[in-house]
């Protein structure tokens, strides 16, 4: 799956975040360890592969625009490892941070191409967005 372009998205969630324009972060973002490919299990366990086949189930609380911006940043961070697909869904309510930005829980699944097979990694991450709408951290 080709990465989505970093297109600013308008969002209106609260007075503190009114008209925030979101965009994915740059290539300096680090892929959280739980999403990085596992070199010790190039194809992953069969049980884990089956468990991770269904669609991600979003939980209410984080707007789709925030999820999309965070997904774009994960795509950028995962491509150097051979990612071929990245899925993301809200994992609950976002929270404001003192600097005026926000932190959102996101469930992310990354599929990697591995020697004619795939490795799937899935994890709940925290996606931090600064007051300007730029994704600045993935944890």
Image (spheres, rainbow, N blue to C red):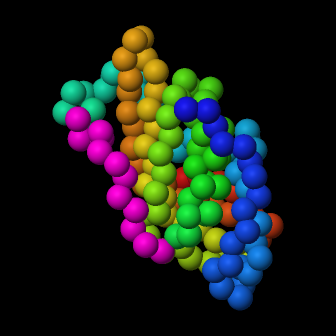
The residue positioned 31% from the left and 26% from the top of the image is: 44
The residue positioned 61% from the left and 33% from the top of the image is: 2
Q: Could you tell me residue 34's position as x and y percent?
A: 44, 42
Q: Is residue 71 visible?
A: yes
Q: Which portion, as a residue range, is magenta? A: 50-61
Q: Is residue 36 visible?
A: no
Q: How many marks?
A: 0
Asked whether 110 or 31 is in front, the reply is: 110
Q: Residue furthest top?
A: 115
Asked if residue 122 lies left or right of residue 81, the reply is left
The residue positioned 53% from the left and 44% from the top of the image is: 32
Is the residue 15 above or below the residue 57 in the image?
below
Rendering quarter of residue 18? bottom right
Q: Could you tell me residue 22's position as x and y percent?
A: 73, 62
88 in the magenta segment = no
Q: Could you tell me residue 41's position as x and y percent?
A: 33, 22
Q: Could you tell me residue 48's position as x and y percent?
A: 25, 35
The residue positioned 66% from the left and 42% from the top of the image is: 4
Asked if residue 91 lies left or right of residue 132, the reply is left
């Amino acid at each position: 799956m080709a990465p989505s372009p970093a297109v600013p998205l308008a969002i209106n969630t609260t007075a503190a975040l009114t008209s925030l324009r979101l965009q994915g972060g740059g290539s300096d973002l680090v892929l959280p360890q739980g999403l990085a490919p596992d070199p010790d299990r190039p194809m992953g366990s069969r049980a884990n592969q089956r468990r991770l086949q269904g669609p991600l189930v979003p939980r209410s609380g984080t707007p789709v625009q925030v999820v999309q911006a965070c997904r774009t940043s994960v795509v950028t961070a995962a491509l150097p490892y051979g990612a071929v697909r990245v899925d993301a869904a809200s994992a609950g309510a976002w929270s404001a941070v003192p600097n005026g930005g926000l932190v959102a829980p996101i469930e992310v699944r990354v599929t990697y191409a591995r020697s004619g097979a795939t490795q799937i990694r899935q994890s709940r991450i925290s996606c931090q967005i600064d007051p300007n709408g730029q994704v600045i951290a993935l944890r």
